[in-house]
Image: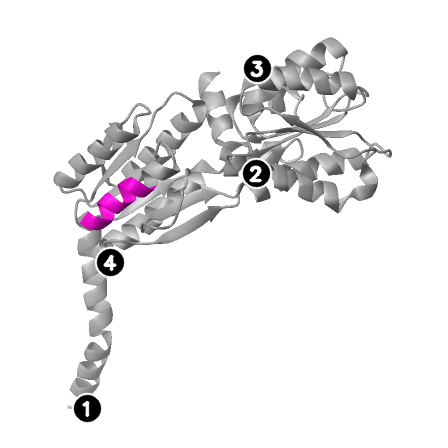
Amino acid sequence: MKKLTILLVVMCLLAPTLLFSAGAKEAKSDEITIAFCFQDLETEFWVAGHKAITETLRENGIKVIEKNANEDANRQLEQVKDVITQGVDGVIIIPQDGESAVTIAKVCNEAGVPIGVFNRPPSDRSAKNLVVVANNEVIAEAAVEHMAQEAKKLGRKVYPAIMVGDLGDPNAVGRRQGFMNVMAKYPDLWAQAPVEIPTKWDANVALANLQSAMQANPKIDFLFTSSDFLFPVIKSVLAPLGKWNLVGDPNHVILGGLDGDVTAARLLEEGYLDATGVQNLFYEADLMLEAMLLAIKSGEKTPDKWMDDPGFALTQANLSTKAEEMWGWVLYKEKK
């Protein structure tokens, strides 16, 4: 009788756990459908973002409905309304811009469908959504920190410069600030204040302004670009000046960037690039999926959480151990 009493007590204590486990198993086995609505696949970055999201979802047994808006915010809004009508359990978007992200999120909020915004944040927080976004300041600082350590090895002062993006873009502001943080950290390392070279995220503007900067400041030997897509422009300017050389060459310009694209991967492998800051798309995809599934399984209709990707710097020093974590490196190796 005593044993029977103990058994009943133990069963009562375990009952909630057993019920929870059974429920979790049932939720896991249920077919979950998530709509992934993206704005285009015309750049390497968004191709990699699409790959990271869709592969992560399917590896976890999630049914995925894909919608390409072809850079049309209104079309994306209609696509989201359509998948809501189809009864999807959640929506993940790469929006055309921050304002359209807010509009679409409010539609999902009204319908009671969880929404996640990937890598391009809403312009304000008036809607409730899951947001994962790269910390551009931290990522830029990591890349420039490596460049500074390389500069210290020279045993002399260096002449720094930064190619600045469109400062109307928060990404450009964060990247510039990350660069400036390192400038302030090592005041005795610099021969002069950094030269700021406007690019407006336009290759032609960048080319003209870099040529002018190199004419006015021919001693520049420490150059950070706020986006990797400008490396071909940089090569076209530095090469005729005898400044496009491998790391370790006496005439090498210490070179860094941010994005982690295919060109940066190639230049790192060839030995021309010292470091690039990497937006960790694979990590961002995992964060988004984890938060989305938690919301769906818990019945939360309007989850509201902003998640930060601290990224990392891929450098000549950690290339052999970290390269596979860079989205551009993965695409680069697939193309070879």
50 is within the stretch colored magenta? no
At a point 47% along the width and 48% down the height, the residue shown is: 308
106 is within the stretch colored magenta? yes
According to the image, label 4 marks what residue? 298
Disc nearer the start of the sequence (1/4): 1
Q: Residue 79 is drawn in which quadrant?
A: top left
In this view, which residue lies farthest toward the top?
240
Q: Is residue 257 above or below residue 179?
A: above
Disc nearer the start of the sequence (2/1): 1
Q: Is residue 48 above or below residue 302?
A: above
User: Is residue 140 shown left or right of residue 223?
Assistant: left
The Cα atoms of the two marked residues, 4 and 2, are separated by 37 Å
The Cα atoms of the two marked residues, 2 and 1, are separated by 71 Å
Q: For the residues carrying marks 3 and 4, which lies nearer the camera in this image?
A: 3
At a point 67% along the width and 21% down the height, the residue shown is: 272
The location of residue 325, given as percent across then percent down, is: 50, 35
Disc nearer the start of the sequence (4/2): 2
The location of residue 156, given as percent across then percent down, is: 86, 33
Q: What element carries label 2?
A: helix
